[in-house]
Structure formats: structure tokens, C-alpha cells
Amino acid sequence: MIKLIALDLDGTLLNSQKKISKANKAAIHSAIKKGVKVVLCTGRPLMGIKQYVDELQLLDAEDFSITYNGGLVQRNHNSEVLSQKTLSYEDIQAIYTLSQKLEVPMNILDLNYVYEPAYPVDRPSLYPSLQSASLPFIKCDIDSFKENQRFNKVVFCTEAKFLDQTISKIPADFYQRFSTMKSRPLLFEIMHPEVNKGSGIEQLCNLLNITSDQVMVCGDEENDLAMLEYAGVAVAMANASEQVKKAATFITKSNDEDGVAYAIQHYVNE
């Protein structure tokens, strides 16, 4: 029996117009009425998904979201942090040193801001253009942070071709020190080594006494793989990457064909 549904946003719950379809909304509300917990699981900060939380009316004290690709579990109604894994001051310094060597722009995110240390000449970050970049931006000096300050993630955001070239030059030991994922063609994310969507869902399930076999997830991209591997029911969208489809137990319709509603109907509402 499914007790929790975790939903990715872009390419999954949201259609090409970044909207939640009427069918998806109706299916979600039907599942909630059956006692199923519905959780949004995204790389965005909570502020960046507020419109969808409000639209789905996920505003009770026991409604939660998993943000920063699993690095943060929060209550929706008051933003209370229930679980988080963060990067240290030393981590930020090391990543910035690498970004300067690779000449790739870097942004740093915590719960409240997106920080903009000096960018390489003629290569500003494209992160302000993304909808997910909904926090206030602050220009800063990389040495201005306090040594006890904690950060939720770092992003490299630049043209897709240059980003791919950059990623290929990152040393192997870097991937052992951090959790990394390319969540969009122009966006590379760097987090605490234990952070992924699967670990975020596991943290929430532990708090709610829900087991992995009682979880259904829906996703479409690389950063969804860990949650598909965790869940008892792993749903890939028809528009998902081939890697995600191979990890799935069920392939639903596309995000423009109410694929989330189709999966919920198949596993929960029938």
C-alpha cells in the first residue's frame, strides 16, 4: 500500500508550460483524501516552489517538501527544518578555487540567499535566469564568509557545451568528496556527499515511520535516479532519460500527457 508519493517538478509534475494540469491536481487530491502523503522533491529552495505548494494546498502542519535535491527536509507551512546536510566554509573555499581554475561561474546557496562571488572575465553565471533561482542574489567576496557558516549547495551555471567541457576536467577525487549532479543542460550542482533525493526521502520516511516499499516516486532526470532506486514503486515519465527509464518499475505518460495522474491512478486510486 502506497503511503507517500514524492514528485519531481520540472519534466514530471509540471508540463512544458511549467503548470500543474487539472488532471494531475485532481489525482493528487484524490490520493491525499485516501491518506497518502504527497511531497514535492526538487532541487529548488522551498521559496522557489511556494506557488506549487499553495496551488496543491499542501499547507497543513504535516505537509513537507524535500528541497535542494534531498539536502533539506522542511515543513511547508512554516519552513521548519527537520533534516539537512550542508557544506562547510572549507568546502566552499575548495570549490571556488576549482571554479577559478576551470574559469566557470559559481553560485553558493543557503536557506536565504544566492551568493555571487567574482565570476571569470566575460563569463557571468546564467543562474539568475532560471526560475529555480528564486532567492535574493547577493554579490560577495569569497573570503567574507564566517568559518562556522553553512551552505546548502553550490552551482555552476553556464552554456551547456562549455559546462560539459568543464565537468570533464574536474578531478576524480572531487567526486569522492562531494555529491554532484547535472540537473539541467546548463546546471551542475555540488552538495554534501550524502545528499541525493533518495536520502532526502529516506530521512522524511524515517520521521513518518514509512518504509521504502510504501513509497512511490515520479521523475525524469539524472538527479531523480537515487529516489527511484529507494522507492518501492519507481515511476519514470515517458519523456525521461533512458537511464531513468532503465531504473524504473513503471513508465507512465509524458509530463504533457498527465503522466503523474496516470501513475497515481494506476498505483493508488484504482
Image (cartoon, rainbow, N blue to C red):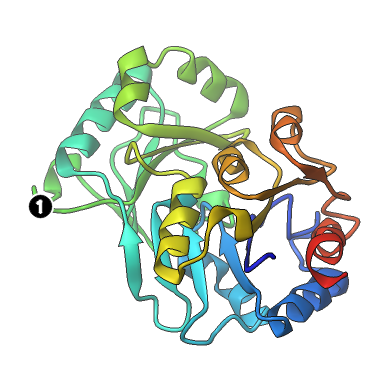
- For residue 214, what is the image quadrant? bottom right
- In the image, residue 230 sits, relative to residue 149, either above or below, namely above
The one nearer the camera, 176 or 231, is 231
Residue reaching furthest to the left: 147
Name which residue type carries label 1: Asn
Where residue 53 sits: x, y (%)?
60, 75
Left or right, 137 with reference to 148: right
Residue at x 68% of width, y 65% of height = 2
- In the image, residue 151 sits, relative to residue 161, either above or below, namely below
Q: Which residue is mark 1?
A: 148
Asked which secondary structure carries label 1, the reply is: loop
Residue at x 36% of width, y 28% of height = 120
The one nearer the camera, 63 or 1, is 1
The one nearer the camera, 137 or 7, is 7
Left or right, 120 with reference to 124: left
Which quadrant: the N terminus?
bottom right
Residue 246 appears in view:
yes
Left or right, 226 with reference to 8: left
Residue at x 76% of width, y 28% of height = 242
Where residue 11 sits: x, y (%)?
73, 49
Where residue 61 sits: x, y (%)?
46, 86
- In the image, residue 36 sits, relative to residue 7, either above or below, namely below
The one nearer the camera, 127 or 110, is 110
How many other residues sit within 10 Å of disc 1, few (<14), some (14-19) or many (≥20)? Answer: few
Which quadrant: the C terminus?
bottom right
- For residue 161, what is the image quadrant? top right
Residue 187 appears in view:
no
Left or right, 55 with reference to 203: right
Where residue 222 sits: x, y (%)?
61, 35
- For residue 20, what is the image quadrant? bottom right
Residue at x 74% of width, y 60% of height = 14
